[in-house]
């Protein structure tokens, strides 16, 4: 198994101001401390080359799991091995094997051209000049961002930025890619492009992927296996079809809205 999590628990301390009219004033001297249990004992394992969907409602603990697997957060207890390493203990060697994309955050420098961020990543990961050139050509070509390399990140649209984020996460040829809501806020055309790219990268290069999303079309297009988390606990781990059969047994018609809208944009020559 390439990814193993065993009984991972994580809670956060949150400080709350006393309520009421004088709460603001009293809060300057005393605060109530509360414990939020984000993960209450999560266990799963993932094989090399799998593309697994990780879904659940807001606040269920998805991002916390991704942050622990990426080595950004340390859990309170439990065990985690990613390619045989414990992420938060062997961070440097761990990050060379993984790529991470957070849909709501950027790993690119905001004010400088995209190419400058890529150059920094090249040095950070110690990618040789030849390998960097060929990988950059390949990724920018497939993702359609070659013409954007000299544009400052702040001038990119969300969809353009997300394609650049994907290229940045894959420059060093990681074996595992963690994706936290990579299609959030994107239009139908960009969503389809990113799904197509992820599928190709998984199938052709065998990159293992864990995909967090609220978009069921992402799930259907990409994931055969789905893990459902709720209140920090794993509630389901199995085939997407099993989940659909259980919770939507009587669906009679399915309209793929993303594909419909993408076709409409194409017809209107809007892309
Ligand atoms: N740094 C933090 N400090 C305090 N509480 C936190 C922190 N990070 C997460 N939490 C809490 O932990 C719980 C799980 O949060 P998490 O971000 O993992 O959920 P999520 O499933 O990714 O949600 P969403 O779908 O909204 O992104 C939530 O109750 C959240 O408020």
Image: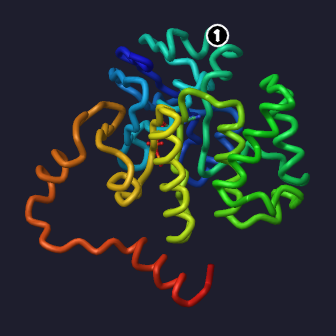
Q: Which quadrant, please, contains the C terminus?
A: bottom right
Residue 141 place in picture, x, y as percent: 70, 55
Classify residue 13 by image quadrant: top right
In the image, 180 versus 120, the foreground residue is 120
Q: How many marks?
A: 1
Report whether 269 appears left or right of 137: left
Q: Which residue is mark 1?
A: 90
Residue 29 versus residue 85 in the image, above or below: below
Residue 43 place in picture, x, y as percent: 33, 21
Q: Cβ of disc 1 within 8 Å of ligand 1?
A: no
Q: Residue at x 63, y 17 (%)?
A: 94
According to the image, what is the colour scheme of the structure? rainbow
Residue 91 versus residue 244 in the image, above or below: above
In the image, 184 versus 12, the foreground residue is 184
Report whether 219 appears left or right of 235: right
Q: Residue at x 42, y 71 (%)?
A: 258
Residue 161 versus residue 262 in the image, above or below: above
Classify residue 44 by image quadrant: top left
Label 1 residue SS: loop
Residue 124 place in picture, x, y as percent: 82, 26
Q: Residue at x 53, y 59 (%)?
A: 184
Instruction: Return the residue found at the far bottom.
Output: 268
Neighbours of disc 1 within 10 Å: few (<14), some (14-19), many (20+): few
Residue 6 place in picture, x, y as percent: 36, 14
Q: Residue at x 86, y 35 (%)?
A: 120
Classify residue 130 by image quadrant: top right
Q: Which quadrant, please, contains the N terminus?
A: top left
In the image, 25 versus 103, the foreground residue is 103
């Amino acid at each position: 198994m390439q990814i193993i999590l065993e009984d991972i628990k994580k809670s956060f301390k949150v400080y709350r101001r006393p309520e009421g009219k004088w709460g603001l004033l009293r809060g300057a001297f005393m605060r109530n401390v509360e414990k939020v249990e984000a993960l209450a004992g999560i266990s799963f394992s993932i094989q090399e080359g799998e593309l697994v969907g990780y879904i659940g409602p807001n606040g269920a603990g998805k991002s916390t799991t991704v942050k622990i697997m990426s080595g950004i957060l340390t859990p309170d207890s439990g065990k985690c091995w990613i390619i045989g390493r414990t992420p938060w203990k062997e961070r440097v060697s761990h990050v060379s094997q993984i790529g991470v994309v957070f849909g709501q955050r950027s790993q690119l420098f905001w004010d400088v051209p995209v190419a400058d961020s890529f150059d920094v990543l090249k040095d950070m990961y110690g990618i040789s000049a030849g390998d960097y050139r060929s990988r950059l050509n390949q990724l920018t070509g497939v993702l359609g961002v070659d013409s954007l390399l000299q544009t400052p990140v702040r001038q990119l649209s969300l969809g353009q930025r997300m394609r650049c984020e994907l290229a940045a996460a894959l420059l060093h040829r990681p074996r595992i890619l963690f994706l936290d809501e990579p299609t959030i806020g994107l239009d139908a055309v960009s969503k389809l492009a990113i799904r197509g790219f992820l599928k190709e990268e998984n199938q052709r290069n065998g990159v293992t992927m864990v995909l967090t999303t609220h978009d069921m079309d992402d799930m259907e297009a990409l994931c055969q296996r789905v893990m459902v988390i709720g209140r920090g606990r794993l509630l389901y781990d199995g085939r997407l079809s099993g989940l659909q059969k259980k919770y939507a047994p009587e669906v009679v018609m399915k309209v793929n809205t993303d594909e419909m809208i993408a076709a409409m944009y194409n017809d209107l020559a809007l892309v």
